[in-house]
Amino acid sequence: MKAIYQILGFPKEVYEMLLMNMFFEWCNELAASEKELQKLMSDQSLLNWYMTQLPAYEEIFVNEVEQFGITDKDEIHRHYHRVTTMINGIFPGPILRQARRSVLTVEHN
C-alpha cells in the first residue's frame, strides 16, 4: 500500500508540513486568543492525541480513493481535506483543559 504522501503526490516533507498546518488550524478553531493558541500548539499531549486520531481518517480517505477510483490529483487533495477535517469535530476534553491551564515559558538566550 502506498503511503499517504504518495497518494497525495507530495514529497514526505510537504506532507509533514501539511499535517502541522492541519493541527494549527484545528488549534486555531479551539483557541479563544493568540496566547491560548500558543498554549495549545505547544502542548505535546494535544499534538500526540491529534496525530493518534488522524490515521483513522486517513484510512477512510485511502479506502474511498480506492473504492471510487479517484485519480485526479486536485480531487484527491480536496477529498483528503474533506475526510481529515472531520477530526475538527472531536475535542479531547481533559487534554484540552490541561493544555489551556499550562503556563507558557519563554527562554531568552
Image: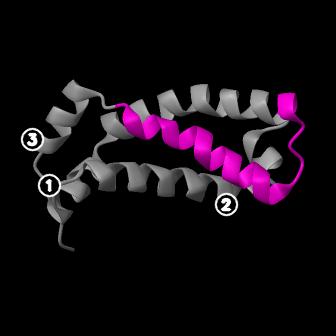
Looking at the rendered structure, which numbered label has been put on residue 101?
Answer: 3
Q: Tell me the quadrant of the picture where the N terminus can be found.
A: top right
Q: Residue 83 location in percent, x, y?
A: 60, 38
Q: Tell me the quadrant of the picture where the C terminus can be found.
A: bottom left
Q: Observer-nearest residue: 60 or 40? A: 60
* Amino acid bearing label 1: Leu
Looking at the rendered structure, which numbered label has been put on residue 36?
Answer: none
At 40% from the left and 55% from the top, the residue drawn is: 24
Range of magenta residues: 66-90
Quadrant housing residue 13: bottom right
* Amino acid bearing label 3: Arg
**Label 1 residue SS:** loop
Question: Which of the marked residues, 3 or 2, is nearer the chain's N terminus?
Answer: 2
* Magenta span dominant secondary structure: helix
**Label 2 residue SS:** helix
Q: Observer-nearest residue: 33 or 51? A: 33
At 66% from the left and 54% from the top, the residue drawn is: 15
Q: CA distance from mark 2 to mark 1?
A: 28 Å
**Label 3 residue SS:** helix
Query: As drawn, is 44 to the left or to the right of 9?
Result: left
From the image, state whether disc 2 or disc 1 is nearer to you: 2
Task: Look at mark 1 in the image and give the residue it sits on.
Answer: 104
At 38% from the left and 49% from the top, the residue drawn is: 26
Residue 60 appears anywhere in the view: yes
From the image, state whether disc 3 or disc 1 is nearer to you: 3
Looking at the rendered structure, which numbered label has been put on residue 14?
Answer: 2
Q: Residue 45 location in percent, x, y?
A: 32, 34
| 79 in the magenta segment | yes
Q: Residue 88 location in percent, x, y?
A: 41, 40
